[in-house]
Amino acid sequence: MDIVYIRDLQVETIIGIFDWEREVKQRVSLDLEMATDIRPAAQTDDIQHALDYKAVAKRLIAFIEDSQFQLVETLAEQVAAIVRQEFGVSWLRLRLSKPGALRGSRDVGILIERGDKLAGAAQ
């Protein structure tokens, strides 16, 4: 199994439970690891055989910018579902954080894993 990753993807969105959070966009940051088999892409040197991280990032940016969730948990589940369903990713690890959301802390957030980690190596 190989991993394609995106680190510190920052997106502005409406997120939070407090009234003021529903009125201003806040920055969220994503670290995403996705299981894949890079061998077909490496053998052909063709993006059609690769997990296109730019396409993943563009899709997630568009989705997150348009979303208005209250909880980071909900946003994380939706992001994971998009990556798994639309990009055929068998396993992922997602770290989603809200920088500056908690005084005295750089950021707060969650870390989730979804899917079968070994399925990416089965081919």
Image (cartoon, rainbow, N blue to C red):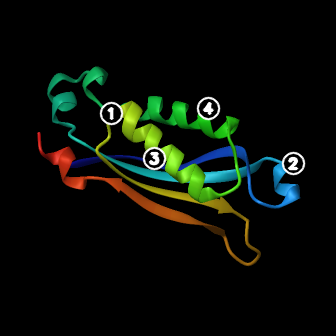
Residue ID at (20%, 40%): 37
| Comes first in the chain, label 3 or label 2 | 2
**Position in image of residue 34 (x %, y %):** 34, 47
Q: Contact, CB < 8 Å: mark 3 with mark 1?
A: no
Q: Contact, CB < 8 Å: mark 3 with mark 2?
A: no
User: How far is mark 1 from mark 4, CA to CA?
Assistant: 18 Å
| Comes first in the chain, label 1 or label 2 | 2
**Among all residues in the image, which is located at the extreme left?**
123
Residue ID at (51%, 36%): 57
Q: Can you identify the residue that label 4 sits on?
A: 62
**Among all residues in the image, which is located at the extreme bottom?**
104
Above-or-below relation of 49 to 112? above
| Comes first in the chain, label 3 or label 4 | 4
Q: Residues within 10 Å of mark 2 (few under 14, many from 20)?
A: few
Q: Can you identify the residue that label 2 sits on?
A: 23
User: Helix, strand, or loop for circle 3?
Assistant: helix
**Quarter assignment of residue 12:** top right
User: How far is mark 3 from mark 4, CA to CA?
Assistant: 15 Å
Mark 2 vs mark 4: in front? 2
User: How far is mark 1 from mark 2, CA to CA?
Assistant: 36 Å
65 sits left or right of 6 in the view: right
Q: Can you identify the residue that label 1 sits on?
A: 51
Q: Residues within 10 Å of mark 3 (few under 14, many from 20)?
A: many
User: Helix, strand, or loop for circle 4?
Assistant: helix
User: Helix, strand, or loop for circle 1?
Assistant: loop
Q: Amino acid at mark 4?
A: Ala
Q: Can you identify the residue that label 3 sits on?
A: 80
Mark 1 vs mark 4: in front? 4
| Comes first in the chain, label 1 or label 4 | 1
Residue ID at (66%, 70%): 106
